[in-house]
Amino acid sequence: MLYLRLRPLAAAIFLTGFSSVAFAQLGQNLSVDIRSLSMGNAVTADPPGISAIHFNPAGLAKIEGLQTDVQGIVANFNVKRDLSAPAGYNVFGYSDDPIVCNDAPENPSSLCTDFKGTVNADVEYASIYVPILKKMVDLGEGVPIAAPTAGVAYKPPGSKVTYATAIYAPLIVGYGSENGNPGNFMGQQMAFERITYLSPSFAFQVNDELSLGASLGMSYQAMSLKTDLRFPNELIGVLRMVDDVVCSPFRDNSDIITDLLLLGLCNANEGLNPFGKFGQLKATMEQSLAPSYNLGLMWEPSDDFAFGMVYQSESKMRLKGKYYIDNANAPRELIRALNSSATGQIFAAILGFPSYIPASESGLVSMDLKYPAHFQAGIKYKILPDLQINFDVGWTDYKQWDQFKFEFDRQVSALKIAKLLSNGVTDSTLAVPLKFTSPWSWGIGIEYSATDRLKLRAGYEPRSSATPDDKRNTMIPINNAQLFGLGLGYRFDADTDIDLTLAFLRSRDNIPANTSSLSNATGVDNLILNPYAGLNVRTNTQVTLLGINYRTRW
C-alpha cells in the first residue's frame, strides 16, 4: 500500500529527468554541423567554419574578413522495441500480462495459456517541445526533426583576433506513440532540447602555427514527458493474491469482524493487478539560460599536419517545472478500503499512509542538473597531397550522473512513506541512483580532394555507452552505437562553398529478463521503475541524418 502512492509520483519525476540522460547519449553532436558528421566528428584539428565555436573555437582564427554560415539538418529516428515472455515467466505466480498474453480478460486462469511471442512496441513519430506554446507537438509519422543553424564571424583586416557567434542545437530529439502502444509505459511522448541561441566567441592567432580560442554558450534547456504507468512487481502480485484468494469468500458476506481482521482491504471495488495501468503522467522542466563555455587550442606547424584540443565545460542548471498525474481507480480503491476499517485506519496512521488518493495530482518540482563536460583532442594529417585523414579521441563526464535529486516545493506524503523503505528520500526530496560511467570514444574521418573545387568525405565514429548493463531500458533505445558519415564539399567560387552530408547511426540492444533494475527486474525491491518486469526486451535504433551547409565570405 505504501508502494501505491509512491509509485506514480516517483516514477513520473524520475522519467522526466532520466529522459535527459537518454537523449544526451543518443543525440550528442548529431545536430551541430554536417561536415563534422561526414568526418565522424573527428574535426578538433580541422574545425568546420563557424561551427568551430562548438568543436574548437581556436579554429575561428582561419577565417578572414566577414563570413556567414547557414545550414539545415533533418533527422529521422526509427526506434524499434520488442517485448517477449521467457520460459517460466511470472510475477508472483501470475503471467496473464495482456502485453504478451492473448488470453481473454474473463479467463479465470492466472497463468497465460497463449503467449503472443514477440510484441512490437515501436516508436511511431517524432515529437518536439515548443517553448512558446509550452507543449509537445507531434510531427506525424515519417516527418523528421529539423535543426536549422546560422552563424557569423568577422576578422578585421590585419587583426589577429576573430569574433563570431552562432545559433545551433547541441541536442534536439523527441519521439511519440499512439495510445495503446506497449512501449508507452516508458514514455508515450518525450522531447529533450538544448538550443544555444547566443555564443559570443573569439580566436587569437598567437603566431603562424598556434591559435587559441574561447566561446560562451547561452542555451535554453527543456525536457518534457508523457507516459503511462504500471508496476508489475512481486508486492503488487501479493496484493492481487490477497484480493483473489483471501477476499473472495468475504466479497458479499463481509461483516465488522472480517473488516477488522482484514484491515478493510476486501472492501475495494477493484483489486490491484501487477499488469494493470496505475495512471498517466505529464511533466515538463526547463531553464531559459543555461550557460557553458568552450576553450580550444590548435597547433598547425605545416599544411600537412595539425593538432587540436577542446574543453567543453559542464553547464550547471536549475531546472523547474510542473507535473500532472492521473491516478487509476484500483490504487484509489485500495486506499479507500483500507481507511474504511477501524484497524485499517490505525494501521495507516501508524505508518503515515495517505487517507485517500485523488483522481489527479499536480505540483511543482525542480532539480539541479549538470550538462556533462566534454574533452576532445585530435590530429589531421595529409598522407597524400590530395588525401587527408583526421583522428580524434574524446571523453564525456557522464559519471557525474551518479544520481538525480528532485526537490519539491512542499512536503509530499508519498515521500514521507517512501523514506521508511528507501535511502535518499526525505519529506520533500527524492534521489534516484543511476550509476553512469564516463567512457572514452574515438572517431576517424577521411577527406579526398577530387578536384580544386570538389572534396569527398567519409567518417566513422563508434560510440561507447555510458549506461551500465543493469540500468539499460527502452527509454534509452541505444547502448553501444556506430555512426557512419558520407559527404561532399563544392566550391562555387573563391567566396562560396556548399557542403552536403548523409549520416547514419545504428544501435542494437538486448536486455534479457531480470537483468536491468530500470526495465525488467523482478522481486520486491524494484521500487522505482520496472514496467516490463520479467520480460525480454530488445531495441533497434536507426537515425538517418541529411544536411546542407551554405558558407559565404563577404
Image (cartoon, helix red, strand yellow):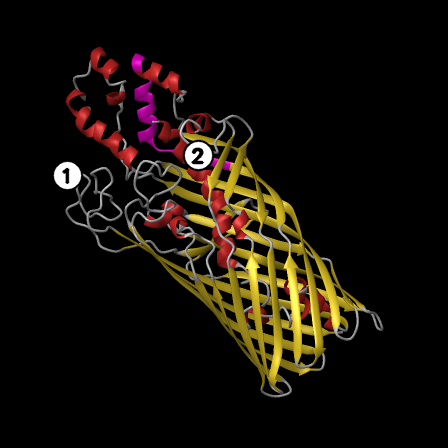
Image-based side of 203 in relation to 402, left or right: right
How packed mark 1 is, by other alpha carbons closer than 10 Å (few <14, some 14-19, many 20 or more), is few
Q: Secondary structure at mark 2?
A: helix
The amino acid pointed to by label 2 is Leu
Q: Secondary structure at mark 1?
A: loop
- The answer to if 342 sits in the magenta stretch is yes
Q: Image height check: is 413 above or below 304?
A: above
Q: Is residue 484 left or right of residue 519?
A: right
- In terms of sequence position, does the residue under pointer 1 or pointer 2 come before the other? 2
Measured as percent of width and height from the top left, residue 133 is found at 56, 46
- CB of mark 1 within 8 Å of CB of mark 2? no
Residue at horizontal 37 percent and vertical 27 percent from the top: 2
Q: Nearer the viewer, residue 19 or 174?
A: 19
At which x and y percent is residue 149? 62, 63
| The label number, if any, that marks residue 284 in the structure image | none
Query: Residue 521: percent from the left, percent from the top?
Result: 32, 44
Which amino acid does the dot numbered 1 rest on? Ser
Numbered label attached to residue 109: 1
- When asked about the image quadrant of residue 263, the answer is top left
Residue nearer the viewer, 246 or 300: 300
Report the residue marked by disc 2. Answer: 9
Residue span colored magenta? 323-343
